Amino acid sequence: MENTKAATVVDALLTRRSVRAFLPTPVPRAEVERLLALASRSASNSNAQPWHVHVLTDEPKQRLTEALWRALDGEGRVAETEYPFQPAPDDWEEPFRGRRKVFGERLYGETLGIEAHDAHGRLAHHRRNYDFFGAPVGLVLTVSRSTLASALVDAGLFLQALMLVARHAGLDTCPQAAFIDFYPVLRRHLNIPDDQIVVCGLALGHADPGHRLSDFRTGREPVDTFTTFYGD
Ligand SMILES: Cc1cc2nc3c(=O)[nH]c(=O)nc-3n(C[C@H](O)[C@H](O)[C@H](O)COP(=O)(O)O)c2cc1C
């Protein structure tokens, strides 16, 4: 599938997807700055703008990837107590469990051809999270801990805006909670102060149109499954 440029916000919404295979084509720093400036127009509670973005390219990105791979291969996941709250449930309830299962089966099974019992194959794909799936730009988004609940909402708005303006520029992204698994490695590596917490990573670059993941799309539930209307 060819890389296309989104002309409108609806195009940007409809063509945005989590891309997990990028070309090495660089994205100029001025372009990243332009996208971040646009994303910072997002709403935030009392205009607090609690976000901070660490932008990694070239050597610094490579060094972070190697540190994370060492942690993944050696220590495994870090103790959850080191992260200030549980980022995702251990045991997902329905209907979320079922949706995750469908997503996992379609991504790993149908698209990547990795069998459910193939832990090695799954790990090999998961590992690619930590080189931002080959994207030339890796971002790590943090927010101020002092305003956490509202800051997480604000961070979500910022992230979505960034993904949409990236699409408008013909670029693609993948938000990545996988980075939270190695929170202390990130904190050490990026000198993240105690009053900041990591929300997620974000891969940014040009999608690889020749990769077998390029046609992977996820579905959505219909509006009536998540909406209650009051009045006519
Ligand atoms: C906060 C957040 C964290 C995510 N973490 C990861 C991740 O670590 N690795 C990954 O491959 N995808 C990750 N995703 C992408 C989701 O799997 C994806 O958004 C979802 O399946 C819907 O697909 P779409 O983004 O292609 O529409 C994350 C998405 C969000 C919003």
Image (tube, grey):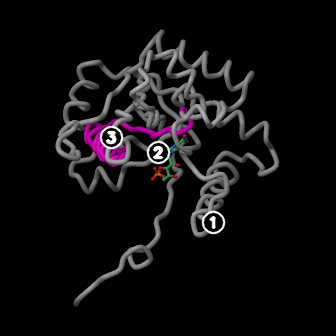
Query: Is label 2 within 8 A of ligand 1 (CB to nearest ligand atom)?
Result: yes
Q: Nearer the viewer, mark 3 or mark 1?
A: 3
* Label 1 neighbour load within 10 Å: few <14, some 14-19, many 20+: few
Cα distance, mark 1 to mark 2?
20 Å
N-terminal of the two: label 3 or label 2? 2
N-terminal of the two: label 3 or label 1? 1
* Label 3 neighbour load within 10 Å: few <14, some 14-19, many 20+: few
| Residue 123 image offset from top left, x and y in percent | 72, 36
Cα distance, mark 3 to mark 1?
33 Å
Specify the quadrant of the image occupied by residue 106.
bottom right
Report the residue that reaches farthest toward the top: 59
N-terminal of the two: label 1 or label 2? 2
Q: Nearer the viewer, mark 1 or mark 2?
A: 1
Say whether residue 4 is left or right of residue 202.
left
Amino acid type assigned to the residue bearing label 2 in the image: Ser
* Residue bearing mark 3: 147
Specify the quadrant of the image occupied by residue 169.
top left
* Residue bearing mark 2: 18
Amino acid type assigned to the residue bearing label 1 in the image: Gly
User: Dot 3: what SS?
Assistant: helix
| Residue 138 image offset from top left, x and y in percent | 44, 25
Magenta residues: mostly which secondary structure?
helix
- The residue positioned 47% from the left and 45% from the top of the image is 18
Q: Is residue 71 above or below residue 223?
A: above
Report the residue that reaches farthest toward the front: 146
User: Dot 1: what SS?
Assistant: helix
* Residue bearing mark 1: 98
Where does the magenta region start and end?
Answer: 152-179
